[in-house]
Image (spheres, rainbow, N blue to C red):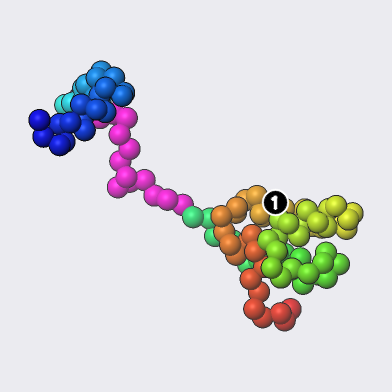
Amino acid sequence: MSKNTKRQKKLEDMMGSSSTKKRKENNDHTSTGSKQNAVDTSTTSTTVKKVSENDLDVLKQFDLDMTFGPCTGIPRIDRYERALRHDLNPPIRVLELIDLYPNDRQVTHCIWHDYTL
């Protein structure tokens, strides 16, 4: 018995021999059956939301307003929550933008290098 056959036999013993057969049957079925559920990636486009200049200005104003404390070395959400805890009434639009663009570092972190308004 070869090394691969021993591994496959061991896997079948651990997982049950039917799991390998089912996987093989499913692969055979999809290759010969209809592919109605398949997603055509050539027509599917990924839409990346771009932050508007007005929204970036709102974030910059929030960053530069020392009423809410320092912004260096802290994510905006932490700074926003800190301002809420201290009843400083930070702009709700900042939280909306953070929720709208959770993976955009330009929105979630203070990254201003030019501190002129």
Query: Furthest-left residue in view?
Result: 1
Residue 28 vs 3, above or below: the answer is: above
Quadrant in the picture for residue 70: bottom right
- The disc labelled 1 sits on which kind of residue? Glu
Q: Residue at x 63, y 61 (%)?
A: 107
Q: Residue at x 83, y 53 (%)?
A: 84
Per the rendered image, the range of residues in magenta is 33-47
Task: Provide residue 67's location: percent of width, then percent of height.
Answer: 86, 67
Number of on-image labels: 1
Quadrant in the picture for residue 33: top left
Left or right of 39 on screen, residue 63: right
Q: Nearer the viewer, residue 54 or 66?
A: 66
Task: Provide residue 9's location: percent of width, then percent of height.
Answer: 20, 26
Query: Furthest-right residue in view?
Result: 87
Q: Nearer the viewer, residue 88 or 34?
A: 88
Task: Provide residue 75's location: percent of width, then percent of height.
Answer: 68, 61
Task: Name the residue carrying label 1.
Answer: 96
Q: Residue at x 64, y 78 (%)?
A: 113
Q: Is residue 31 magenta?
A: no
Task: Provide residue 34's location: percent of width, then percent of height.
Answer: 22, 26
The answer, for residue 88, to whether it is visible in the render is yes
The answer, for residue 26, to whether it is visible in the render is no
Q: Is residue 38 magenta?
A: yes
Left or right of 24 on screen, residue 78: right
Judged by its main secondary structure, the magenta piece is loop
Q: Residue at x 82, y 67 (%)?
A: 69
Secondary element under disc 1, as helix, strand or loop, is helix
